[in-house]
Amino acid sequence: MVQTDRTGPRPSTPVRTCIGCRRTDSRSALLRVVLEVGEHGPTVVPDPERRRPGRGAWLHPAVSCLDLAVRRRGFGRALRSSVAPDTSVVAAVVEDLAQGQLSENEDRKRV
């Protein structure tokens, strides 16, 4: 259902922008990430439940979007970090999700 306000039609679901590819999508299609500051410096961690406190950024759970976000320094900019954060945790999660989607697609092809 599309709602209308004074600026025109609006989607009824929240829309977010991927920091990698810069395309908009629904919240359910994107992975939220937040910045945690630990003893080894700032680290980007996934927030699949969308409940962690702090400023969040949104990313398609695809390796291509992750690579674009790292190359464009999108995590530091979106999360307002002056130091380049460590993205290894998010990279591992995105790769796991990509492997899971690949195995699902292979199973579907066999049927």
Image (cartoon, rainbow, N blue to C red):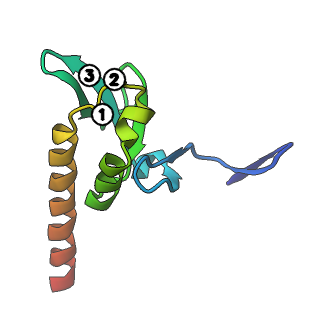
Quarter of the picture containing the C terminus is bottom left
Q: Name the residue type under label 1.
A: Asp
- Determine whether, in the image, residue 55 is placed left or right of residue 105: right
Number of numbered discs: 3
Q: Name the residue type under label 3.
A: Glu
The reply to whether the C-beta atoms of the residues labelled 3 and 1 are less than 8 Å apart is: no
Q: Residue furthest top?
A: 39
The reply to whether the C-beta atoms of the residues labelled 2 and 3 are less than 8 Å apart is: no
Kindly identify which residue carries mark 3. 36
**Secondary structure beneath label 1:** loop
User: Where does residue 95 sit, x and y in percent of width and height?
Assistant: 17, 55
Kindly identify which residue carries mark 1. 47
- The label shown at residue 37 is none
**Secondary structure beneath label 2:** loop
Name which quarter of the figure residue 45 lies in: top left
User: Where does residue 75 sit, x and y in percent of width and height?
Assistant: 36, 38
User: Where does residue 5 sit, x and y in percent of width and height?
Assistant: 82, 43
Circle 3 packing at 10 Å, graded few (<14), some (14-19), many (20+), is: some
